[in-house]
């Protein structure tokens, strides 16, 4: 399966390249960076593993989409939307791991999925997606007697908050509880807040050091508390999950999918 990677010279892009090179049946055919990047014309293999591959980093994303079976996209929202249009234009599958996407951005991606297979997830790890599945189940089972809080921590260089994974967890809990996520969230608390409103889903964000990613979902009820936690030790696990998603797209009908679809959860 021919795989292309946009943003291939970034930290995540290099890990995606390395994972693709290690995967049987996957063929890394190219990658791109934004114009002006110092990595243009660098060897993708050297960037990813230190070993030359004979494929240089390019700038023409349209050319990459025209040649690939699936493109991996872990960049920033504006670039993701531009690449989504290319996926629809060329009918090429795309795996999106970009975080910080707005509801409006997701509407554009959903529209494009009418012409291309698109897998979108705020987190590509098996463990996190199991946690998302559990979030919905537990919220449904416990009901409104339990308050829901989502706590996440990442490295100090992360530029969006709360994380895409935290939002996945909160939305899954809202779905399990049968409420609208947008109407239930409390993103921050400061000063004199008064009592916690019933039925809300709270978020707390921590940033510091080189933490890869830690997420906890807390259900606090009368006289008891349930906490479910996932801690990522190595960013490579996200790359492996993304490659798994890329391989899964082969033969799928156009549509918008999640990692739960990929994993059969």
Image (cartoon, rainbow, N blue to C red):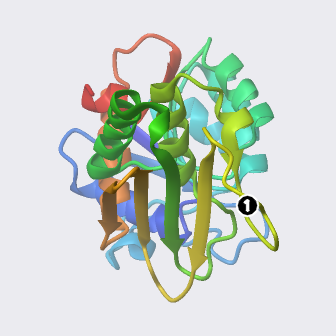
- Horizontal side of 85 relative to 198 (left or right) equals right
Residue positioned 58% across, 41% down in the render: 64
Residue positioned 75% across, 41% down in the render: 102
Residue positioned 32% across, 67% down in the render: 231
**Total of numbered circles in the picture?**
1
- Horizontal side of 232 relative to 158 (left or right) equals left
In depth, the one of 233 and 177 nearer the eye is 177
Q: Position of residue 89 (x, y in %)?
A: 69, 21
In depth, the one of 114 and 19 nearer the eye is 114
- Horizontal side of 122 relative to 192 (left or right) equals left
Above or below: residue 240 compared with residue 92: below
Query: Label 1: few (<14), some or many (≥20) within 10 Å?
Result: some
Seen as rendered, the residue at the extreme bottom is: 209
Q: Quadrant of the N terminus?
A: top left
Q: Image quadrant of residue 49? A: bottom left
Residue corresponding to mark 1: 34
Examine the rendering and report whether any part of residue 111 can be seen.
yes
Kindly state the secondary structure of the residue where label 1 is placed. loop
Q: Image quadrant of residue 246? A: top left
Q: Position of residue 240 (x, y in %)?
A: 30, 53
Q: Where is residue 6 in the image (x, y as percent from the top left)?
A: 58, 52
Above or below: residue 237 compared with residue 27: below
Seen as rendered, the residue at the extreme front is: 223
Above or below: residue 177 compared with residue 52: above
Examine the rendering and report whether any part of residue 27 can be seen.
no
Residue positioned 73% across, 25% down in the render: 107
Above or below: residue 180 compared with residue 24: above
Q: Where is residue 63 in the image (x, y as percent from the top left)?
A: 64, 39
- Horizontal side of 79 relative to 134 (left or right) equals right
Q: In which quarter of the image is the C terminus?
A: top left
């Amino acid at each position: 399966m021919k795989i292309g990677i946009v943003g291939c010279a970034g930290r995540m892009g290099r890990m995606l390249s390395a994972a693709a090179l290690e995967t049987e049946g996957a063929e890394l055919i190219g990658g791109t960076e934004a114009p002006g990047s110092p990595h243009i014309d660098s060897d993708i293999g050297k960037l990813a593993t230190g070993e030359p591959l004979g494929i240089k980093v390019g700038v023409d994303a349209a050319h990459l989409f025209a040649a690939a079976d699936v493109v991996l996209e872990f960049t920033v929202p504006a670039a993701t939307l531009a690449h989504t249009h290319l996926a629809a234009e060329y009918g090429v599958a795309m795996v999106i791991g970009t975080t910080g996407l707005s509801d409006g951005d997701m509407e554009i991606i959903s529209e494009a999925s009418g012409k291309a297979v698109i897998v979108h997830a705020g987190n590509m790890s098996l463990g996190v997606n199991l946690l998302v599945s559990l979030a919905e189940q537990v919220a449904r089972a416990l009901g409104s007697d339990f308050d829901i809080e989502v706590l996440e921590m990442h490295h100090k260089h992360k530029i969006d908050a709360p994380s895409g994974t935290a939002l996945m967890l909160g939305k899954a809990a809202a779905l399990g509880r049968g409420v609208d996520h947008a109407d239930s969230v409390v993103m921050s608390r400061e000063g004199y807040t008064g009592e916690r409103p019933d039925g809300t889903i709270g978020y707390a964000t921590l940033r510091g050091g080189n933490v890869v990613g830690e997420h906890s979902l807390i259900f606090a009820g009368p006289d008891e508390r349930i906490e479910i936690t996932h801690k990522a030790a190595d960013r490579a696990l996200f790359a492996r999950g993304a490659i798994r998603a890329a391989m899964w797209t082969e033969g799928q009908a156009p549509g918008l999918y999640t990692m739960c679809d990929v994993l059969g959860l």
